[in-house]
């Protein structure tokens, strides 16, 4: 919220949260004009032009659609929605409202991904034909509330959080995944989780351009947290580093290279605008996301991760979970023709 507060074209009008103590603490840090415990106050306020939704994932689709229909521009945390019905309704809400929608998927803004964008758009990778992505995030400590009740994260399927993995590829290429086959596995001796939970879920995805893509997601694993992306093209290949270096270290090998080792490059965030301060750990991508969202509103859009791209990043995960449940390959709908 400090990213909006300090932006020269924005005013932080309101903060909303169900938890009064957390809301008070956040207000002390960000100094909004007003606070509220009720999202209906936000949607009904004529003084609010845009809403940034950073709420539990199962709420994103319905809350974004409601905000759009209330005449607000919407920046939504990932994923865009959790169900096919919510995806369909979100797409309709954008069309009905004429407001700007943007998904706050941060990986296309990370330094290592900016490097692969440079390689791809300059033609150095050629045509991509295969990709892999992994996202490991230990959430065991967030599965239960202080009173012992399970939170929404407790039984969440990892593949319902696909955008960090497939988002960079889709954002960069404009491709779309058309079918998903999902698999799930768990260990026998759980490191803090029930053995019956799906510790690790994998999707094999096929794209409109014929690209095969493996997406692996885990919320419980004897493996450090972090990101990984690998892309194979007919002129070159690319990999991020693993773990926390995945954001900033890129490796690549191009046609004509004679060394057996991939080039390893430490990448940096673009220079920050003068107004940036007090944003926190995700400052680099957050600044880019906020700037693009505000520019889309000021310039009349569209946003760089609009509702079509947002749903193309989200639907493969929903369909892959459906594949796990049925044991069959699932066709992924096209928002532009199927919604």
Image (spheres, rainbow, N blue to C red):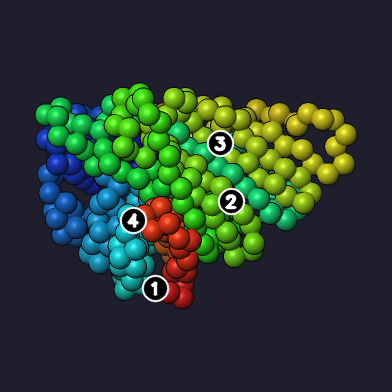
Question: Residue 189 location, x and y as percent?
Answer: 36, 25
- Residue at label 1? 339
Task: Check contact, mark 4 vs mark 2: CB within 8 A.
Answer: no
* Cα–Cα span, label 4 and label 3: 23 Å
Task: Check contact, mark 2 vs mark 3: CB within 8 A.
Answer: no
- Residue at label 4? 81
**Left or right of 7 on screen, residue 112:** right
Q: Earlier in the sequence, mark 4 or mark 2?
A: 4
Task: Check contact, mark 1 vs mark 3: CB within 8 A.
Answer: no
Question: Residue 228 location, x and y as percent?
Answer: 56, 36
Q: Provide the secondary structure element on which disc 4 rests.
A: loop
Q: Provide the secondary structure element on which disc 1 rests.
A: loop
* Cα–Cα span, label 1 and label 4: 14 Å
Identify the disc placed on residue 213.
Answer: 2
* Cα–Cα span, label 2 and label 3: 13 Å
* Cα–Cα span, label 2 and label 1: 24 Å
**Nearer mark to the viewer, of 4 and 2:** 2
As drawn, 39 above or below 97: above
Identify the disc placed on residue 228.
Answer: 3
Q: Provide the secondary structure element on which disc 3 rests.
A: strand
Question: Residue 309 location, x and y as percent?
Answer: 48, 60
* Cα–Cα span, label 4 and label 2: 22 Å
């Amino acid at each position: 919220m400090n990213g909006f507060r300090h932006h020269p074209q924005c005013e932080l009008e309101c903060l909303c949260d169900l938890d009064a103590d957390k809301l008070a603490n956040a207000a002390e840090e960000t100094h909004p004009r007003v606070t509220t415990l009720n999202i209906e106050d936000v949607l009904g306020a004529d003084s609010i032009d845009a809403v940034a939704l950073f709420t539990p994932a199962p709420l994103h689709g319905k809350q974004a659609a409601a905000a759009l229909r209330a005449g607000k521009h919407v920046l939504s945390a990932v994923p865009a929605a959790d169900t096919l019905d919510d995806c369909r309704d979100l797409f309709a809400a954008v069309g009905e409202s004429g407001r700007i929608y943007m998904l706050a998927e941060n990986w296309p803004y990370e330094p290592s991904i900016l490097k692969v964008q440079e390689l791809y758009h300059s033609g150095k990778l050629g045509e991509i034909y295969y990709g892999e992505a992994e996202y490991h995030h230990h959430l065991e400590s967030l599965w239960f509330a202080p009173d012992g009740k399970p939170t929404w994260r407790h039984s969440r399927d990892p593949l319902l959080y696909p955008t960090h993995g497939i988002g960079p590829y889709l954002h960069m290429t404009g491709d779309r995944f058309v079918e998903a086959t999902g698999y799930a596995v768990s260990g026998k001796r759980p490191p803090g989780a029930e053995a019956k939970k799906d510790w690790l879920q994998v999707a094999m995805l096929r794209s409109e351009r014929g690209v095969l893509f493996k997406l692996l997601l885990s919320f419980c694993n004897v493996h450090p947290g972090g990101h990984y992306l690998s892309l194979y093209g007919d002129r070159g290949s690319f990999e991020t580093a693993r773990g926390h270096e995945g954001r900033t270290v890129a490796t690549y090998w191009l046609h004509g290279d004679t060394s057996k080792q991939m080039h390893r490059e430490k990448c940096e965030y673009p220079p920050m605008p003068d107004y940036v301060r007090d944003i926190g750990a995700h400052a680099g991508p957050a600044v880019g996301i906020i700037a693009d969202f505000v520019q889309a509103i000021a310039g009349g859009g569209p946003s760089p991760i609009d509702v079509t791209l947002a749903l193309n990043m989200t639907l493969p995960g929903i369909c892959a979970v459906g594949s796990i449940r049925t044991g069959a390959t699932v066709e992924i709908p096209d928002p532009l023709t199927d919604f």
